[in-house]
Amino acid sequence: MPWLAAIAHEKGVSAYVGEGMNRWPSVHRYDAVRVYRLALERGGQGEAYHAVAEEGVPYRKITEAIGRQVGVPAKSLAYEAAEAHFGGLAKWVANDGPASSEWTREVLRWERREIGIVADIESPTYSQQLT
């Protein structure tokens, strides 16, 4: 998120593409650490686990939170304008990539404990890293 905040600060707007309903999966770093630990302790050899606490947060909500922290408005951009705004990252920013950790949660008996990405961005500790 710090690079998105840097772009928002530099450009004066925290941008999303279109309606901003493309979804980003997320996991708090502490929850991710627990998944990896559990995979080592309980996981099967050769299995792949997916550490996802939030299966698909609308990107617009993320950019709105970043905008509040950086002090700039959130704004919709057409994809062509997003290419100029984000450069080579525009395709990644506009990607819709929901993901599920249902199997991981079931097999490893893992549940999310930490706050979600929007609340994390808005927390005082995190927001200090963005400004």
Image: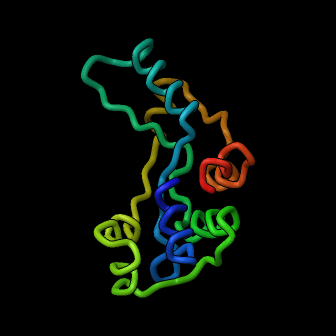
Which residue is at the front of the view, 116 or 55? 116
Is the residue 19 above or below the residue 51 in the image?
A: below
Q: Residue at x 30, y 26 (%)?
A: 47
Q: Residue furthest top?
A: 41
Q: Nearer the viewer, residue 87 or 31?
A: 87
Q: Is residue 69 left or right of residue 86?
A: right
Please tell me in which quadrant of the rendered image residue 45 appears: top left
Q: Where's residue 53, x and y in %?
A: 55, 43
Residue found at the very far right of the displayed protein: 124
Residue furthest to the left in view is: 46
* Image coordinates for residue 27, horizontal then vertical, percent: 53, 42
**Vertically, is 106 above or below 85?**
above
Determine the residue positioned at 57% across, 71% down.
60
Total marks in image: 0
Which residue: 37% across, 67% down? Answer: 95
At which x and y percent is residue 5? 54, 61
| Residue displayed at 49% across by 42% down | 52
Where's residue 83, x and y in %?
Answer: 33, 79
* Above-or-below relation of 12 to 35: below
Q: Quadrant of the C terminus?
A: bottom right
